[in-house]
Amino acid sequence: MDTDAILLERWNALAGAGARAAGEDLVRRYGETHRRYHTVDHLAAMLAVIDDLAADAADVDAVRYAAFFHDAVYAVDRGDNEERSAVLAETVLPALGVSAERVAEVARLVRLTSGHHPDPADRNGGVLCDADLAILAADESGYAAYTAAVRAEYAHVPDELFRKGRAAVLQGLIQQERLFRTPTGRARYEVAARANLAAELAALTDD
């Protein structure tokens, strides 16, 4: 079964078979040709991590909905992707019979991915943000593939500007007291992620 089919199966299990058209639209969005990292593979990987961290969430289905929507609208040079994705969730989910309370939570979670700074007591936010950042703890080949995909999404940006911007992003992450907010996420990902970030930053700033 290919990734698109797996994601549709997961969406149908979450939202119901009657929501298939909405799921097909979401999967199509993650397959847009300009994407190199924010793809169906990224979404599938996030859902797998959410499964692993499910016990840390207060409403794991809200977190799963948020994963499906968090990059549903994605344009490289726009700063409002998360907001537009949240608005999409607020438009689509009520028509599928999702409760107003859960729709509001999903939209809140999607907006949270713009900065990955959940409150320490925000169990759902912690799980979603940990799942979104879990790639930072990948093994050497996985991390290299991730950084190559990010660079490919910004292929139109000159190398010097990209290196400067990427270094600023990495420094912002490194300066956070904790990259991962759930106990499981911290134990599983924190050390490896910090090592990867430090190595990438050193390579970017090496003159």
Image (spheres, helix red, strand yellow):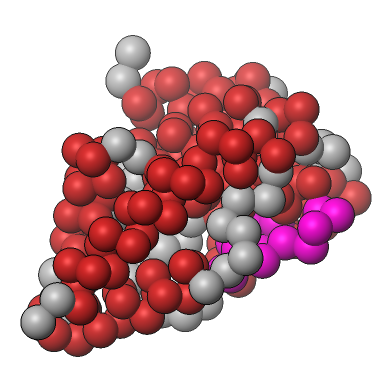
Q: Is residue 194 found inside the magenta-colored segment of the image?
A: no
Image side of residue 49 versus residue 87, left or right: left
Of residue 170 and residue 202, the one placed in the foreground of this image is 202
Image side of residue 78 versus residue 150, left or right: right
Q: Residue at x 47, y 61 (%)?
A: 73
Q: Residue at x 62, y 65 (%)?
A: 177
Tell me where residue 94 appears, x and y as whole percent.
Answer: 78, 48
Q: Is residue 118 found inside the magenta-colored segment of the image?
A: yes
Q: Quadrant of the C terminus?
A: bottom left
Q: Quadrant of the N terminus?
A: top left
Tell me where residue 141 appears, x and y as whole percent.
Answer: 20, 38
Residue 29 seen in the current view: no
Number of on-image labels: 0
Q: Residue at x 17, y 61 (%)?
A: 152
Q: Which residues are magenta?
A: 109-122
Tell me where residue 180 appears, x and y as whole percent.
Answer: 60, 51
Of residue 4 and residue 185, the one placed in the foreground of this image is 185
Image side of residue 50 versus residue 170, left or right: right
- Quarter of the image where one finds residue 86: bottom right
Residue 175 seen in the current view: yes
Q: Is residue 37 above or below residue 18?
A: below
- Quarter of the image where one finds residue 15: top right
Q: Report the magenta stretch's main SS.
A: loop
Tell me where residue 39 appears, x and y as whole percent.
Answer: 34, 46
Q: Residue at x 52, y 47 (%)?
A: 190
